Image (spheres, helix red, strand yellow):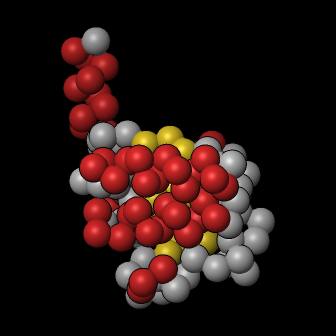
Amino acid sequence: MRLAIVGYGKMGKLVEQLAPEFGLEVGLKLDIDNNLDGAGITPENFRGIDVAVEFSMPAVVVGNIERMAALGVNLVVGTTGWYEQLDRVRAAVERAGTGLVYGPNFSVGVQAFLRVVE
């Protein structure tokens, strides 16, 4: 499975590091330098990409989701701070017929804490 990493900060780099352990190939990495205003989200760049992992910033995540969904890309979104636009995102994903998984916090520490509390 080939994946795109959109948002190449701490979490994006961790996803890249761990991907091979799970049989995943990173086929594309987008960050502020090559995806300004969504410029990197093109059919050419996403050709052969099965899923995108989105860890960018709240100000751009909704636009990124809409663009990638329109390309037929399934998404895992770890960016937070955009949930007031969930209806807009849901509509874009449903219109495109793609999948979306999002979580309020993907950090390892928070996930470990949640499991302990469980």
Residue 80 visible in the current orientation: no
Residue 41 visible in the current orientation: yes
Q: Residue at x 73, y 81 (%)?
A: 44
In the rendered image, residue 33, in percent from the top left (x then y), is placed at 41, 87
Name the quadrant of the C terminus.
Answer: top left
> Residue 52 versus residue 98: which sits nearer the camera?
98
Most extreme residue toward the right is 48
Q: How many marks?
A: 0
In the rendered image, residue 94, in percent from the top left (x then y), is placed at 61, 47
Q: Residue at x 23, y 26 (%)?
A: 113
Q: Which image quadrant is residue 41 in? A: bottom right
> Residue 73 versus residue 86: which sits nearer the camera?
86
Q: Residue at x 55, y 82 (%)?
A: 40
In the rendered image, residue 62, in percent from the top left (x then y), is placed at 40, 62
In the rendered view, would you say 95 is above or below 117?
A: below
In the rendered view, would you say 64 is above or below 45?
A: above
In the rendered image, residue 1, in percent from the top left (x then y), is placed at 73, 52
> Residue 36 versus residue 13: which sits nearer the camera?
36
Position of residue 22 in the picture relative to residue 77 (left or right)? right
Most extreme residue toward the top is 118
Q: Residue at x 71, y 77 (%)?
A: 43
> Residue 103 versus residue 9: which sits nearer the camera?
103
Q: Which image quadrant is residue 58 in? A: bottom left
In the rendered view, would you say 28 is above or below 33?
A: above
Position of residue 33 in the picture relative to residue 28 (left or right)? left
